[in-house]
Image: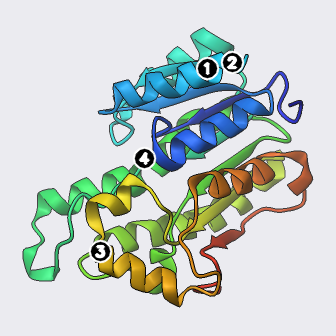
Amino acid sequence: MNKFKGKVAVVTGGGRDIGRAISVALAKEGAKVVVNYYNSEADAQATVDEIKSSGGEAIAIKADVSKLADIQNLKAKTVEAFGDKVHILVNNAGGLFARKTLPEFDEAFYDLVMNVNFKSTVFVSQAFEPLMGKGASIINISSQAARDGGGGGSSLYASSKGAATTFTRAMSKELGPKGIRVNAVCPGLIGTKFHDDFTKDEIREKVAASTPLRREGRADEVADLVVYLASDSSSFVTGANFDINGGLAFS
């Protein structure tokens, strides 16, 4: 309960699925958590309520983190609520939105996928880095898709996550001298609404059966890895992209 006592964490897309699990896990270790959301207000408030019911501190803040003005508003409201120091930033916001092949792309779809998955990671990091000091940690949520190109119709999603993976390595070099660590987590098939919406049941069953552990992962398992990367237990770990896929794919 004391890993993050007195520390502030910001989790983009923190209201549901993996984001909710991360928010709750950080709060259980004592962090004051900013649960960012855009469309999922009810989910974000439910996450905050869960944290508070266990004695933690959290607030929900609406922001479209693909827009710079909203990011600045998120930062301002974070400072207003919890002060001008942020110790943990989790860039979790993202989405697939639709499965489309190359002939089906248009500029609007390209912008949507790249902005939500990559632009947000860049500019949220830029906004909060001045509030972060020695010992702080940034964790980017990438994807197994960044490793293997993703499933059918997810090439833009995979590419955006690949960009986040490379950005993680670059920022570890840039921010390391300031004592800020930057790592990424690359989940495989995790049982969340993401796959409920975009992956057919037969595909999920096939992937789970071909995974050495013979199952899908859970959001709380991803959150446990994030807690490790946010904590002093990983104080000499930076620039790494951690696979969490049950052994389905390796770095």
Amino acid type, label 1: Ala
Q: Residue at x 73, y 52 (%)?
A: 224
Q: Which residue is mark 2?
A: 84
Along the viewing direction, whichever of 203 and 85 lies nearer the viewer: 203
Image position of 250 (left or right of 70): right
Earlier-in-chain disc, 2 versus 4: 2
Q: Which residue is mark 3?
A: 154
N-term-proximal mark, 1 vs 2: 1
Q: Is residue 70 left or right of residue 99?
A: right
Residue underneath mark 1: 58
Q: Are marks 2 and 4 in contact (CB under 8 Å)?
A: no
| Residue positioned most to the top | 80
Instruction: Choose mark 3 or mark 2, whichever is in front.
Output: 3
User: Residue 93 location, x and y as percent?
Assistant: 44, 46
Q: Which type of secondary structure does the marked residue at label 2 adopt?
A: loop
Density class for disc 3 (Cα within 10 Å; few <14, some 14-19, many ≥20) is many
Does residue 72 appear in the picture of this structure? no
